[in-house]
Amino acid sequence: MTISRTASRTANPADVATPTRVRYVILLLIFVITTFNYADRATLSVTGSAMRAEFGFDAIRMGYIFSAFSWAYVLSQVPAGWLLDRFGARRVYAASIFLWSLFTLLQSSIGVLGSGAAAVTALFVLRFVMGAAEAPAFPANAKVVASWFPTRERGTASAIFNSAQYFAAVIFTPLMAWLTHAFGWHHVYIVMGVAGFLLAFTWLKVMKNPAQHPKVNRAELEHIEQGGGLIHGRQTQVAASRAGQSRWSVMRQLLGNRMLLGVYLAQFCINVLTYFFLTWFPIYLVQARGMTILQAGLVASLPAICGFLGGVLGGIVSDAFIRRGHSLTVARKVPIVGGMLLSSCIIGCNYVNTDWLVVALMSLAFFGKGLGALGWAVVADTSPKEAIGLSGSIFNMFGNMAGIVTPIVIGYLVAQSGSFNGALAFVGVNALVTIFSYLVIVREIKRVELQQ
């Protein structure tokens, strides 16, 4: 007679009394993967100067190459969500990591095409398909967190994997710069690509749904499930299919839900801050504040460190509210609203003259952005059980439209006025729109139930 895994877990009283902590191993793994995800996105920013010198790319061509990733990333979000809900995070995420690492590795070889149009085209295509390959990453993170963590731990878990974007800037930017300087730009892509292959293999070995993981005992499983964790993963998607839910029907319901639309709008506004720091911030320091490129590079790391600290603190504060008996709505909105109020202080840079005050205000703004960046926790809290992947992908699509809009809008504002005053006001206003969205549009935060 075969004994079920569930029954075997309850056989030992100690197994029930002392929960395992496998969920933290899973969280560490998605943190590491997300760190590499953002590092791979930044490879061209680090190696771009050396590649321009070798291949003769002008600024316009580099601009198009930079944009390739974001266009593909945004366009691929909805298909990525469908794949996640259909095949599960384990297989789709593994394929995603492998493919984006392969396309990263191949960028090291564009030199065989010589200089000129062929190299430009090859690099554009590789950056484009890399953006498409990375599309499932953050929705998969949200899906994994929704499965592995109870509601009262989900804010911290989501904040930790989301803070990897800042951690990547602090750790990998100097590392890739050193590789470029010591060995040449090709080695950056080789090292990052090979590391990604190892991560894909590790993910397949370690990741399973909580109910199927061999190292999870019954006590941890009950802790997750009783706290609102969706421990059976893809089974909810199967149930939805049997109930006759079509993809387009689900998508219409998600886009027609007022609460979710407010969350999506807020994520766009929050990402305006992110993409300002990723694109125009160093240029602002050089052009508007008269710093050298070296000084700007060092100074730019300070907001990243503050963003990392704020990101982790935001999750901890949010979950602490839940443990003290506050509603999910209060627990998520307090850090978001408080963080965005801090971020709006970026407008104050227009009214100060000393560099240290500018750096302090920018660091405070990015700390606030990290504190309020709980959108992925809200997605895990609110998405229908049958469509977490799709809901997360729509959320990520809206958010990363800011990666296309923000550099262009700021470019026009700077070109027309000759200063960054309008640009900083634009960024600060988006922080305030985020507050409006959560307080007025979102209202109560709760899980959406799909209509049959």
Image (spheres, helix red, strand yellow):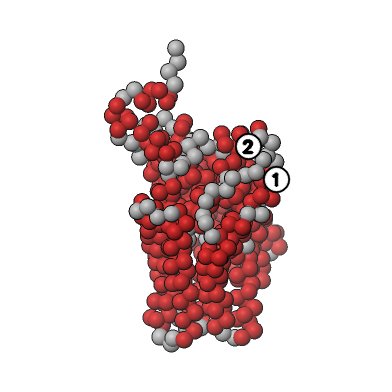
Task: Please indicate, yes or no, whether residue 28 appears anywhere in the rendered image.
Answer: yes
Horizontal arrangement in the rendering, residue 430 relative to residue 333 (left or right): right
Residue 234 image position (x, y, % from top left): 56, 36
How far is disc 1 from disc 2 in space, using C-alphas? 11 Å
Residue 378 image position (x, y, % from top left): 50, 54
Image height check: is 10 above or below 249? above
Residue 201 image position (x, y, % from top left): 49, 39
* 428, 124: nearer the viewer: 428
Amino acid tagged 1: Ser
| Residue drawn at 41 percent across, 30 percent down | 214
* 217, 277: nearer the viewer: 217
| Residue drawn at 32 percent across, 29 percent down | 15
Amino acid tagged 2: Ala
| Residue drawn at 37 percent across, 52 percent down | 325
- Assess whether mark 2 and mark 1 are in contact (beta carbons under 8 angstroms): no
Judging from the image, what secondary structure is the residue with disc 1 in?
Answer: helix
Q: Which residue matches tag 1?
A: 249
Q: Which residue matches tag 2?
A: 240
Residue 24, quarter of picture: top left
